[in-house]
Image (cartoon, rainbow, N blue to C red):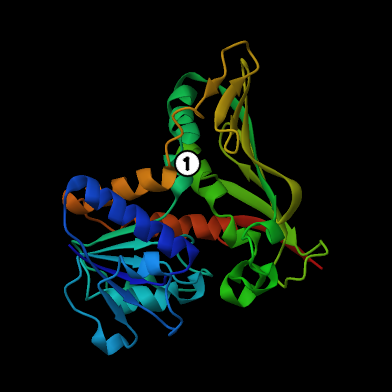
């Protein structure tokens, strides 16, 4: 298969390594091209996986089987449009775009193309298990949190220079931490309405919002979501309040616990890599030609929830 990567930052190289690993397991051949915006040398381990480095768009081929859009989200739209007639399928890193003012219809996507937008938490053992457990639960409300300290995200890199810190590049918790709304809508569907307050409140030297709090109303339950860049004690969990008690899914601890006496489910021994599982899912779609634009439409709808302009009744800015 002929593959092109648009962007080879940390997430792009992760996907590249996972792709190569899976194809090696399948005993399938890969020809990997990489469109690069900089002449900065790649590390030897990454360079060894790439067959062709491309520095001019005019040198791109027109017959790629898969293209990975893994550059900053503020250039995703242009990258997708560039590759629309050059590839049969796309894996687009989350979030799909940096704002909600794009026209998907002008991307000229193929009717038989496969356009997948990343959402790896859906492939975590916690979410996959909750999907089954919650079938028989009467749910009253849900509380989700993603809290961590941005300067600790990337070792050896000044947090002030990464896209997360820069609003113009699509940074800020509203877009950067889109995983929460992605898995919430996977588990519970889309809410009837949402309320959001966000802003910049901490000491962090960034111009993007560092906290966002949502309340969402469903027909039969409420959802609260807390996202921040300044939590010194990392937390990523979901608490589900049901008729029988509270079910807690801990993404960092990789476990599900119950207040009603049921035994805690511990996934740490098996510990499947959700990024690998997601890549396998995408490759399976490509191999079996499971076509459609629904992934892009769904991701765009989630982005509208995250930014808070589509179904939001109130949005307050501070700072």
Left or right: 245 as drawn, with respect to 10: right
- The number of callouts visible is 1
Write the residue at 47% across / 23% down: 133
Residue 273 drawn above or below residue 92: above
Residue 27 x %, y %: 16, 49
Specify the quadrant that holds the N terminus. bottom left
Q: Secondary structure at mark 1?
A: loop
Residue 225 x %, y %: 65, 45
Q: Which residue is mark 1?
A: 189
Write the residue at 59% across / 48% down: 193
Whether residue 289 is visible, yes or no, is no
Residue 165 drawn above or below residue 244: below
User: In terms of depth relative to the viewer, which is nearer, 48 or 95?
Assistant: 48
Residue 294 drawn above or below residue 266: below
Which quadrant holds residue 210?
bottom right
User: In terms of depth relative to the viewer, which is nearer, 78 or 305?
Assistant: 78
Left or right: 303 as drawn, with respect to 160: left
User: In terms of depth relative to the viewer, which is nearer, 100 or 22?
Assistant: 22
Q: Residue furthest front?
A: 44
Specify the quadrant that holds the C terminus. bottom right
The crowding category of the residue bearing disc 1, from other C-alpha atoms within 10 Å (few below 14, some 14 to 19, many at least 20), is few
Left or right: 306 as drawn, with respect to 215: left
Write the residue at 35% across / 53% down: 18
Residue 14 drawn above or below residue 109: above
Whether residue 259 is visible, yes or no, is yes
Residue 221 x %, y %: 60, 33
Residue 103 x %, y %: 40, 73
Write the residue at 19% across / 46% down: 26
């Amino acid at each position: 298969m002929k593959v092109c990567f648009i962007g080879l930052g940390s997430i792009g190289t992760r996907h590249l390594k996972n792709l190569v690993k899976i194809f090696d397991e399948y005993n399938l051949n890969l020809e990997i091209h990489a469109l690069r915006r900089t002449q900065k040398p790649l590390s030897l381990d990454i360079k060894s996986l790439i067959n062709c480095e491309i520095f001019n768009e005019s040198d791109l081929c027109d017959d790629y089987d898969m293209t990975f859009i893994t550059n900053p989200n503020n250039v995703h739209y242009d990258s997708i449009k560039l590759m629309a007639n050059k590839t049969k399928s796309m894996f687009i890193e989350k979030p799909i775009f940096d704002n909600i003012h794009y026209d998907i219809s002008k991307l000229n996507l193929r009717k038989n193309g496969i356009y997948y937008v990343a959402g790896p938490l859906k492939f975590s053992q916690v979410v996959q298990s909750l999907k089954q457990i919650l079938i028989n639960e009467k749910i009253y409300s849900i509380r989700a949190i993603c809290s961590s300290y941005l300067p600790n995200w990337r070792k050896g890199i000044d947090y002030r220079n990464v896209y997360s810190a820069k609003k113009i590049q699509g940074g800020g918790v509203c877009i950067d931490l889109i995983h929460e709304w992605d898995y919430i809508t996977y588990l519970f569907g889309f809410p009837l309405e949402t309320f959001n307050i966000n802003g910049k409140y901490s000491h962090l030297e960034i111009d993007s919002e560092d906290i966002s709090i949502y309340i969402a109303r469903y027909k039969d339950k409420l959802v609260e979501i807390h996202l921040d860049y300044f939590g010194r004690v990392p937390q990523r969990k979901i608490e589900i309040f049901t008729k029988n008690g509270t079910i807690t899914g801990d993404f960092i601890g990789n476990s599900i616990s119950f207040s009603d006496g049921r035994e805690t489910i511990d996934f740490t021994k098996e510990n499947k890599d959700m990024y690998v599982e997601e890549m396998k899912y995408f490759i399976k779609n490509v191999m079996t030609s499971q076509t459609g634009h629904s992934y892009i439409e769904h991701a765009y709808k989630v982005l509208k929830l995250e930014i808070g302009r589509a179904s939001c009744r109130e949005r307050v800015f501070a700072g």
